[in-house]
Image (cartoon, grey):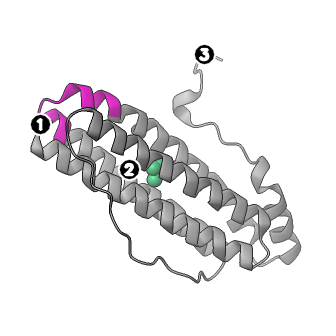
């Protein structure tokens, strides 16, 4: 595996792990605030990010590189509100998409087509996660400061499904 690709993949391993920790912190905060729906949603997001990290670790090692397991800084322990949590989620996902785009560029520059192919999965995953974060954020904004609305939003969070553009059949 080319050095530049290996480095870029290891950077991404760290970012996926940091995302997992960040969302775990949000999940824990929401749980302590009694926001069960938000908390379950964030625990799930955190698990997904850990899975993304592990998938990269295995890929790097299987292709003859060496995956580096990073340590992490302590993520924030407090968040201003549910709105703040979902704003941060979207902002973070946008940054991760940019980082995946950079990774794609490294693969193309280094002519590493198998890794380029592997990374496509992450690109669609990002599309899906950004779409989901945007949809949820729109809903939280509608709720505003209404306590009853927030209660219902939190209760319904697990049933919110988002179909990202890349999975919609344009002919349907
Ligand atoms: Fe790893 O999927 Fe988003 O961040």
Which segment is the magenta one? 106-118
Badge 1 density bin: few <14, some 14–19, many ≥20, Cα 10 Å: few
Q: Which residue is drawn at 49% across and 52% down?
A: 49
SS assignment at label 3? loop
Mark pair 3, 2: CA separation: 27 Å
Q: Mark 1 points at which residue?
A: 109
Q: Residue furthest right?
A: 148
Q: Identify residue for label 2.
A: 97
The N terminus lies in which quarter of the figure? Answer: top left
Q: Does residue 81 lie above or below 102 as drawn?
A: below
The quadrant the C terminus occupies is top right
* The furthest residue to the top: 171
**Which of disc 3 and disc 1 is earlier in sequence?**
1
Residue in the picture at 76% in, 56% down:
157
State which mark lies toward you, 1 or 3. Answer: 1
Q: Earlier in the sequence, mark 3 or mark 2?
A: 2
Task: Tell me how far mark 2 sits from mark 1, CA to CA.
Answer: 18 Å
The CB of the residue at mark 1 lies under 8 Å from ligand 1: no
Question: Disc 3 vs disc 2: which is toward the camera?
Answer: 2
Task: State left or right for residue 101 relative to residue 65.
Answer: right
On screen, 147 above or below 121?
below
Q: Position of residue 153 (x, y in %)?
A: 80, 62
Q: Where residue 59 sits in the image (x, y, percent)?
A: 32, 36
**SS of the residue under disc 2:** helix
| Marks 3 and 2 in Cβ contact (< 8 Å) | no
Q: Does the residue labelled 2 lie within 8 Å of ligand 1?
A: yes
Per the picture, the main secondary structure of the magenta-coloured stretch is: helix
Q: Residues within 10 Å of mark 2 (few under 14, many from 20)?
A: some
- Any magenta on residue 48? no
Q: Count residues near mark 3 (Cα–Cα under 10 Å), then give few for <14, some for 14-19, many for 20+.
A: few
Image coordinates of residue 55 in percent, x first then y, are 41, 41
Q: Which dot marks residue 171?
A: 3
């Amino acid at each position: 595996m080319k050095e530049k690709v290996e480095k870029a993949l290891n950077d991404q391993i760290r970012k996926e792990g940091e995302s997992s920790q960040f969302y775990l912190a949000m999940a824990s905060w929401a749980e302590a605030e009694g926001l069960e729906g938000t908390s379950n949603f964030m625990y799930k997001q955190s698990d997904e990010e850990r899975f993304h990290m592990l998938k990269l670790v295995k890929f790097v090692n299987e292709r003859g590189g060496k995956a580096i397991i990073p340590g992490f800084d302590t993520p924030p322990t407090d968040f201003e509100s549910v709105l703040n949590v979902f704003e941060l989620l979207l902002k973070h996902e946008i940054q991760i998409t940019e980082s995946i785009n950079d990774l794609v560029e490294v693969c193309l520059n280094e002519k590493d087509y198998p890794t380029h192919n592997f990374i496509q999965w992450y690109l669609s995953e990002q599309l899906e996660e950004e779409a989901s974060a945007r949809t949820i954020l729109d809903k939280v904004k509608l709720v505003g400061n209404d306590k009853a609305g927030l209660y219902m939003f939190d209760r319904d969070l697990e049933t919110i499904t988002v179909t990202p553009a890349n999975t919609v059949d344009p002919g349907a």
